[in-house]
Amino acid sequence: MATIIQDIIIPEKSSECSEWISYFKKLEEKFGAENAKTIWLKTWQVNGSTASCTTRPDFNAFFKKQDIDVTNLATSAVASAADLGGSIMGLGKGITQVLTYGVPIVLTAVIAAILYAIVKVSQNTSASDVAALTPQGRVANLLK
């Protein structure tokens, strides 16, 4: 049976996810946002850490708006898989951002470095140096 303190029902391990959200809202109403976070997190640590709520994107989104992170590495991956918007194979949005921004930036830098090297080499190279790289150019150099 759930414990009730000042008209607030404290969720138990078997409580629904919506009860955890309602619990936070009641705490916030009675004690303010910062105190509600502290109380809620302590209750979650004792009663909710085994709850399957952390695999639900709507649950995680609500508490993220409250600046509370209830996920850990394993549950975060499962939640990301459930919320496919912007995630790749459930690995999370961080990888998506790396692929979206990091890869093109790195490729652009590599191409720029190659072009810079080509320009530098071409400034110090003459036509006879390039011709010496071909079999005909090598023969011409031998006949000199």
Image (cartoon, rainbow, N blue to C red):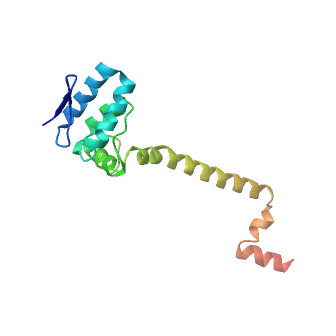
In-front residue for pair 134/16? 16
The residue closer to the viewer here, 141 or 67, is: 67
In the figure, 120 relative to 52: above or below?
below
Place residue 22 in its image quadrant.
Answer: top left
Q: Please indicate, yes or no, whether residue 18 appears anywhere in the rendered image.
A: yes
| In this rendering, position of residue 29 left or right of residue 103 | left
Relative to 95, say whether 138 is above or below.
below
Residue depicted at x 70% and y 52%: 116
Given residues 93 and 103, the one toward you in this image is: 93
- Whole-percent x, y for residue 40 in the image: 31, 33
Tell me if 54 is positioned left or right of 105 in this view. Answer: left
Quadrant for residue 143, please give it. bottom right
Total numbered labels: 0
- Residue in the picture at 65% in, 55% down: 114
Left or right of 124, for residue 96: left
Q: Residue 57: x and y, percent?
A: 27, 39
Q: Is residue 4 left or right of residue 60?
A: left
Q: Position of residue 41 (x, y in %)?
A: 34, 36
Residue at the location (26% across, 36% down)? 59
Instruction: Look at the image and tell me in which quarter the C terminus lies.
Output: bottom right
Q: Position of residue 62 (x, y in %)?
A: 30, 31
**Res 18 → quadrant:** top left
The structure residue drawn at horizontal position 79% and vertical position 61%, both measured from the top left corner, is: 125
